Amino acid sequence: MKKIAIFLSLVIFLTSCGGGQVTPPPATIEKTSGGGSNATDAAAGNTVAAGKGIGQITSVELKTPLEQDRIGRGKSIYDMKCQACHKLTDERLVGPGWKDVTKRRKPEWIMNMVTNVDAMLEQDPEAQKLLELCLTRMPNQNISVGDARDVLEFMRQNDGEK
Amino acid sequence: MKTSFSFKSWLAAIGIFVVVVALSINGCKPRNVATAVQGDAAGKVYVAPGKYDEFYNFVSGGFSGQMSVYGLPSGRMLKVMPVFSVNPESGYGYSEESKPMLNTSHGFVPWDDLHHPELSQTDGEVDGRWVFGNANNTPRIARIDLKTFRTAEIIEIPNSSGNHSSPFITENTEYVVAGTRFSYPIDDNGSNPDVSINTYKDNFKGTVSFVSVDKATGAMDIAFQILLPGVNFDLAHSGKGPSSGWFFFSCYNTEQAYTLLEVNASQKDKDFIMAVNWKKAEEYVKQGKGKKMSVRYASNRYDEGTHTATSTIKNQVLVLDPKELADMVYFIPCPKSPHGCDVDPTGQYIVGSGKLAATIPVFSFAKIQTAIQGKDFDGDFAGIPVIKYESALHGEVKKPGLGPLHTEFDGKGNAYTSFFVSSEIVKWNIDKLEVLDRVPTYYSIGHLCVPGGDSKKPFGKYVIAYNKITKDRYLPTGPELTQSAQLYDISGDKMQLLLDFPTIGEPHYAQACPAELLMKNSTKIYKIEENRNAYAAKGEGQSKVERKGKEVHVYMTSIRSHFSPDNIEGVKMGDDVYFHVTNLEQDWDVPHGFAIKGANNAELLIMPGETQTLKWTPDRIGVFPLYCTDFCSALHQEMQGYLRVSPAGSNVPLTFSMGKNSSKPE
């Protein structure tokens, strides 16, 4: 019982003083293993339903013919940050092979997966299916939106677009 | 364990609850010490799960050679930062990249003794850029980058033995100082000649070094040294505000004893505080008045782009001799082997703490200046003027306790002095020299720390005691007990003991600063694009194995959860294998480890985006497993590989692979 009393007194003191500790900024809840995201509003639900995933990418403009400079940059990012887990064929290594990914997924979904992977794995049903399949969480590889767009262009080329 | 409750115990519990609620309604400040100890000490140090501490506390690791980081008020240990000793946890001093950090003119020194952390300051306020530490044995100063919490630089101090009076800084971190504990023979050529120890008075010299710190990069260089008579320098602090441009050093053994110092260095009533006018010293340097001495010392720097340290041996220092260069150095008598030498936040007062004294003398900077101008001297010591004690004195704190050691300040006109012999902290008013409060420490306090307590703007709130003896305070762990610190609340009139917490090594000096000063700058990853390590594999496509004569270089990548390559053949007896492991991860808190069976040095721990190298020399033929030592994912236990070692002269070709199952043996 004494323990309960002490506990209650702790609660009261904490609320009355509030000193001695700092609330972590929201960034900490995005830790790899902890997961979680604040993007739970209706807008996010809509983009999920539309197959665009969750994140800041809501629309992507694709050009034909392909933008060659993006392809070159996208390939070097692939070599450095993606190749270790993704093959360019349809073979699954750690993650799924990239062949035909641009035919299976909307460009917004791909870019959100690349740039906002932790929220995607927490909330997007398609991303969650992939986690169940691969059992390794895709790491956040610290790829900017601009870089993700370049990677997307490289994926389109890999899928045979001209 | 009993689980039944009597009616009485229920009543007692309700009673405690009511009393505690009643106290808490009165607010945070308890009315007297009794309620404080009974009441809210636990609440004041409780940091709920997932919440952060309010302060970082940088604590010397003493004979461990490292510096540790704690959160306050919880006392939770956050990190041990390797500085002057090898650290198997991170591979510091074992990886090829970090080995040069521990190089000295004596060669590789794997273990030293770190006494004093000092946070960098701008305009006398803690700026959160770097924390410095001193190596007390083989004299060195380290600079730790507070973005990465890693040792960025170590500079050796020549013409020095026992770098104790260090690494204290000037108001804008223009200089970090290094004063010798041991005087030793220094001749005109800057060497340590072969002379009889009993020639101490004639041949032994002390020095204080002023090491410049580059404003932008932090890079350290020895600007000049001051050659001094043979005594022991102990601690130091910079002037500030009105006393800006001056530095104060405590010194003992003015008896110039060289044996049984315990007795022979405690003969005189007074030793000295040494006042150095470093602006004057700078003038002499500019006028070319210094003498160049040939010496040897190592300057070791860690490059964040290449993740690699380089060690450079330097050969010259500039030495100033105060016997020839007037108006630069003065001695002020100070009772009984002073240890602490502390300047108050206004910069007007210098507090000397004679560790065998029963008073605390407080010197006035204004009076020191008047005495110098009026040549109010009491003769000289080895050619250096000695200011009259009374002429420099603001006043003495009478009967404060026994054995004052070190003083810090709260910025509200109060000083807090540790007393080793009487085992207590005493709070006193600087202006009136009156004792206001005293609390016991458990046991035998050495240094103490108020956050920002040696700066112009202390953050106050707590004083932390760093104790020399723990005795019965913790569960026994054999003959060697944990070291310990104690946290006291100083926000009220009376000090209140809140918490005991264990520390590593021996906690000497310590510093603390608000968490928000550092948190926002903390590095999370090394960008793989910016990795300039010569052996980096920036992408799995670049992983490979190359032979250069008897050296085999493995350019290996790691990502959750595999190495590439993970099968290597063609290594032969007589080869040295260098594993250059690049962690391709780009997410916070995802290091990978690397270990291979039979490694005689250590393992690696590689941060995201970083490359680190382990040298491995096979001692027998066979197949050797390698694996990741830091849990990284659900398939961490699958993160492994094999390396085959064949006899010298065998014709097994050098091959490497990952992800392909070889169907048959060659």
Image (cartoon, coloured by chain):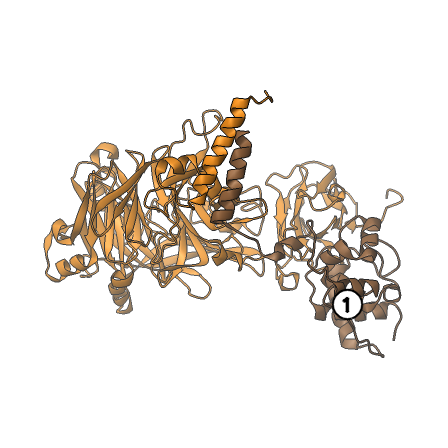
Q: Position of residue B195 (x, y in %)?
A: 26, 41
Looking at the picture, does residue B3 appear above or below residue A15? above
Question: Which amino acid lies under the numbered mark 1 shown in the image of this protein?
Answer: Val
Query: Is any atom of residue B504 visible in this view?
Result: no
- Badge 1 local density, few (<14 within 10 Å), some, or many (20+)? many
Q: Position of residue A111 (x, y in %)?
A: 77, 66
- Please give the name of the residue rendered at 52% of the width and 57% of the height, measured from the top-left corner: B147
Q: Is residue B77 left or right of residue B498?
A: right
Q: Is residue A140 left or right of residue B484?
A: right
- Please give the name of the residue rendered at 85% of the width and 54% of the height, measured from the top-left corner: A92
- Please give the name of the residue rendered at 43% of the width and 40% of the height, measured from the top-left corner: B23
In front here: B60 or B318? B60
In front here: B426 or B524? B426
- Please give the name of the residue rendered at 22% of the width and 52% of the height, measured from the top-left corner: B431
Give the colour of chain A: brown
In front here: B639 or B466? B466
Q: Which residue is mark 1?
A: A151
Q: Quadrant of residue B270?
A: top left
Identify the chain of the residue marked 1, using the numbered disc in the image.
A
Q: Is residue A123 left or right of residue B327?
A: right
Query: Is any atom of residue B371 visible in this view?
Result: yes
Image quarter hosting the C terminus of chain B = top right
Give the colour of chain B: orange
Q: Position of residue B600 (x, y in %)?
A: 61, 38
Looking at the picture, does residue B122 appear above or below residue B163? below
Q: Position of residue B476 (x, y in %)?
A: 48, 25
How many numbered discs? Answer: 1
Looking at the picture, does residue B37 appear above or below residue A54? above
Image quarter hosting the N terminus of chain B = top right
Q: Quadrant of residue B253?
A: top left
In front here: B26 or B74? B26
Q: Secondary structure at mark 1?
A: helix
